[in-house]
Amino acid sequence: MLPFEHLIFINKENKIPVYRQIAHSIIMAIRNGVLKPGYHLPGTRELSKTLEIHRKTVVAAYDELHAQDWITIIPRKYTAVSNRIPILKPQQWNAANDLPSYENNFSLPFRSIGENIQKPFTGLLPEIIIDDGHPDVRISPIDELLKTYRSYTSKRHTIKNANTGTGQGTLKLREELAKYLSETRGLTISTDNLLITHGAQMSIYLAAQLILGPDSHVIVGSPNYPAANAAFLQTQAMLTEVPVDENGIDTDAIEIICRKKKINAVYVIPHHHYPTTVTLSPARRMKLQELSITYSFAIIEDDYDYDYHYTSSPYLPLAGSRHNGNIIYIGSFSKILDPSLRIGFMVAPKNFIDQCTALRTIVDVGGDGYMQNALAFLIREGELKRHLKKAKKIYHQRRDFLDILLKEKLSPYISYVLPSGGMAFWIRLSPEYPICRFTKIPKLNILRTDEKLNAFRFGFASMDEKELETTVDFLKRELEGM
């Protein structure tokens, strides 16, 4: 008889039930060729004594193995390894090869994407989190959204609508969004010009995949949104960076580059550029559109932060002016309602939207129809506009309050320009205070830092005044200790 006390490993602190641990150990012994087809296993009483556990646990393990066809049970006679298992040669135990399966590396050839642009979540939340410009979910109309969502899951016609044609986005949301974008941003579009996505990042990725390729060239600002850069590089296109100053991306530099080589696309964030928060000036907006026509390149306009302006009305998007259809306009509701609410949109000519929809459905057959229709209801009933009016007032107050705090408490260490809108400050540290030291503080997590520019984004919208003061005091203590 084999020494089953050494073949079966039980860890009572493990969350996996003991009977399943026994079953798994026997399966591994069969797989490794130690237990051969037809081999008689100990009876339940005998094995329970050997393992010092209750007999019912062994019975449960054998029942599991029998249900999976690993063993054959002949009542009142014997229990044996199934004869349908092929004969395997016993494998020599090797500690180096005894890792759980997914602790090994994938050893076959595969494509490498590169470093993850997001910091991995360790499961432990730091004491202070500075996001890069998130909305305050506590003031969002999430309750109304979820109430509508729940009501849609209980009616036959709304269930049918939520599960039909979500590849491009539900018709209800596209209808309401077309009207909303016309009223708020001057876009003259129909439902055919809209694709609903899981956030702005998916829209950027889809556009990049269709416009760019190994022989393509795309121009971006420096610094720029890292996730957009990653999406462009995935197409194997060549990435060319041009400076971003207080007036936005440098269109003169773009023109010089266009004279030297064929440019396929320019990616621009016209309102509250990420990460610097600057807004593209009217003169540069006009020149960028002229260059697009002259040199036949697409403009990917990422207008993720359009809705929040505090000192003046926003400029209309580039996509809202007269153009030849080569502007891909991208927006998101994540910055309005909740970062975890992944609903974004793309506006483009119908033939481009059709192909983006086809590409999207290869990896994602459609979005959450219930949530999209619930959002359409919020737009139609004016709830979204009411929320934005309230949120802009609150965020404006928080911006000004943080401005006062930074001037009073951190002025010896930092410099910044007060943003005219958006939900974040772009803060530069003095050279003697390297940002890399902040990233090593266990109690602090800053979502967006730039070691090259020694700067970071300070998202203020998601914090109330008490939270802002606590955060600034924390930073002050750390800077004083450096």
Image: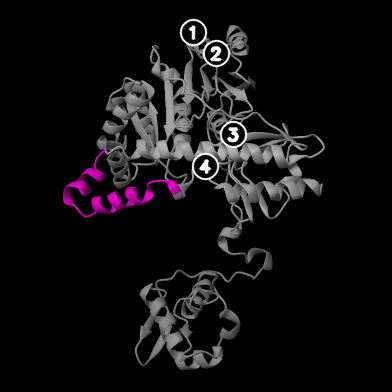
Q: Which mark is residue 354?
A: none
**Magenta highlight range:** 139-166
Amino acid type at circle 3 is Pro
Q: Position of residue 350 (x, y in %)?
A: 31, 22
Secondary structure of the residue carrying tag 2 is: helix
Question: Residue tagged by mark 3?
Answer: 226
Residue density around tag 2, few if under 14, some if 14–19, many if 20 or more, within 10 Å:
some
Residue density around tag 3, few if under 14, some if 14–19, many if 20 or more, within 10 Å:
few
Q: What residue do we see at 55% from left, 88% from top?
A: 51
Q: Is residue 447 magenta?
A: no
Q: Earlier in the sequence, mark 2 or mark 3?
A: 3
Q: Earlier in the sequence, mark 1 or mark 3?
A: 3
Q: Is residue 309 above or below residue 322?
A: below
Secondary structure of the residue carrying tag 1 is: helix
Question: Residue tagged by mark 4?
Answer: 134
Question: Going by the image, does 437 lie left or right of 154?
Answer: right
Q: Can you see residue 36?
A: no
Secondary structure of the residue carrying tag 4 is: loop
Magenta part mainly helix, strand or loop? helix
Question: Residue tagged by mark 2?
Answer: 284
